[in-house]
Image (cartoon, rainbow, N blue to C red):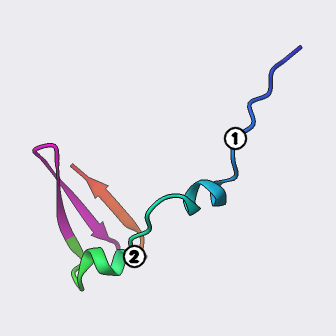
Amino acid sequence: MHDIAVSAPASFIAASLPVVESARLMSGSREIVIQHAGQSYRLRVTRANKLILTK
């Protein structure tokens, strides 16, 4: 027999996590720098209104 892994629906998992609106993070900018564990990451809003996180 095969075991089938069953996971919680994404909506259930997301409901238990803190939510931060991207507009609040970006504060009107198209790009910000996020510091994490001594490293800098750039979060940018594209022309297509998508988010890109790069190191």
Which residue is situated farthest in the right direction here?
A: 1
Residue at 65%, 60% (x, y): give it: 11
Q: What predominant SS class does the magenta segment belong to?
A: strand
Position of the N terminus, as image quadrant, is top right
* Res 26 quadrant in image: bottom left
Relative to residue 53, is residue 39 drawn left or right?
left
Q: Residues within 10 Å of mark 1 (few under 14, many from 20)?
A: few
Relative to residue 1, is residue 27 drawn left or right?
left
Q: Nearer the viewer, residue 29 or 15?
A: 15
Label placed on residue 7: 1
Queried whether the magenta region covers residue 41, the answer comes back as yes
Residue at 39%, 76% (x, y): give it: 21
Q: Nearer the viewer, residue 39 or 55?
A: 39
Q: Nearer the viewer, residue 46 or 9?
A: 9
* Res 45 quadrant in image: bottom left
Q: Are the residues tagged 2 and 1 within 8 Å (C-beta)?
A: no
Q: CA distance from mark 2 to mark 1?
A: 26 Å
Whole-percent x and y of residue 52?
Answer: 34, 61
The earlier-in-sequence mark between 2 and 1 is 1
Residue at 38%, 71% (x, y): give it: 20
Disc 2 secondary structure class: loop
Which residues are drawn in magenta?
Answer: 32-46
**2 up-or-down from 52: above or below:** above
**5 up-or-down from 15: above or below:** above
Whole-percent x and y of residue 37?
Answer: 16, 43
Disc 1 secondary structure class: loop
**24 up-or-down from 19: above or below:** below
